[in-house]
Amino acid sequence: MPRQIAVLGSTGSIGTQTLEIVRLFPDKLQVCALAANRNVALLAEQAAEFRPACVVIGDASCYEALKEQVAHLPVEVLVGAKGLDAAARMPEVHTVVAALVGFAGLASVVAGIKAGKEIALANKETLVAAGALVNEHLAALGGTMVPIDSEHSAIFQCMVGESDKTVEKITLTASGGPFRTRTAAFETITRAEALAHPNWSMGAKITIDSATMMNKGLEVIEARWLFDLPAEQIDVLVHPQSIVHSLVTFNDGSTKAQLGAPDMRVPIQYALSYPDRWSAPHPRIDWMKNASLTFESPDFDRFPCLRLAFEALAAGGAAPAVLNAANEVAVGRFLKDDIRFVDIPILIEAALARFSAASFNTLEELVDLHNAVQAVVLELNRTTTN
């Protein structure tokens, strides 16, 4: 029988590429649920093609429009957080592809875990903000989480067949983004420049995170929870070619690396096929065209967001959640041209200082903290960019 999946965030970059994998393997994968935030037209188009049992629209103002566009289909239309929760819990679903962007994806991941679903995780903010809480649920219920991010998938693949106790260090690679070689005039960086990633095709938020290198910082925090390693055993290397996706060094001095063309369909497919590998026509590396692989140390002075992420991880407690909440608002404001590129880390650092004593014990308390941080950063935006 095909593996039944719910694709939460089906109209985004990871979601649409997930559906490309479904098209490649219709005998192995079947879509039970699709969810998007506001993209009614594409969600309706996907529903017509994949015929899921339900579709979910996050924005309630789009509910009637979606319902009208799928009226001819035998599909249930759900809305908002409750709809996402229901999709993640559907009895027939085996795997929840968590591809929603930002903190909004957390609750549905927890719902899926509590319902005994395997989680194919692309939403890194889930573990950044609530790593301890999520891991508690996974441990209590014996749940499974397989990473989709290319770097974490690489580490996961290198760890297959190895003992956790033999890992000395993991190294996440980073492309360096569009400003790797830029040394001056960061104050004048435009939205268009920041969205022009040299290697990867991603959504706007993650592309800006890559430009600031916050994306790598979030991945460092995510790796801490995925692989149960302290910060001192997690390293970052800038690798402009994006061929080596990450490395694992073991206690005997050997290192494993996972290599491949920069194509997100490969880690998505692996998350859905694990522990198997399915033959697929994804691009292969032409080694004669990639004969030189280079590595550099990250520059924490030019990319302070990466430094802030390491500091938040070292601080522990609520600091990573504060970092994540502040970054979401700062990136959103930059995308609206409300602040400069260089203001993003300034606002995040201000939020970390303001909420240095914050704490939470439950998901509800975390949501309250997230909202409070975002409200403050919205106000900071108006006072730090004159």
Image (cartoon, rainbow, N blue to C red):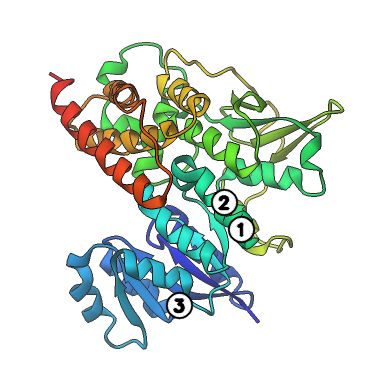
Q: CA distance from mark 1 to mark 3?
A: 34 Å
Viewer-nearest of labels 2 and 3? 2
Residue 313 in picture, x, y percent from top left: 51, 29
> Which image quadrant is residue 145 in?
bottom right
State the residue position of label 3. 50
Q: Residues within 10 Å of mark 1 (few under 14, many from 20)?
A: few
State the residue position of label 1. 140
Q: CA distance from mark 2 to mark 3?
A: 34 Å
Classify mark 1: helix, strand or loop: helix
Could you tell me if the residues under marks 1 and 2 are in contact, i.e. CB atoms within 8 Å? yes
Task: Let me know if residue 210 appears in the view.
Answer: no
Q: Nearer the viewer, residue 312 or 175?
A: 312
State the residue position of label 2. 136
**Number of the label disc, if any, that sits on residue 272:** none
Classify mark 3: helix, strand or loop: helix
Q: Earlier in the sequence, mark 1 or mark 3?
A: 3
Q: Residues within 10 Å of mark 2 (few under 14, many from 20)?
A: few
Q: Amino acid at mark 1?
A: Ala
Residue 367 in picture, x, y percent from top left: 33, 48
Q: Amino acid at mark 2?
A: Glu
Q: Amino acid at mark 3?
A: Phe
Please tell me which residue is depicted at 25% across the width and 19% down the height of the picture.
188
Q: Residues within 10 Å of mark 3 (few under 14, many from 20)?
A: some
Q: Is residue 233 left or right of residue 344?
A: right
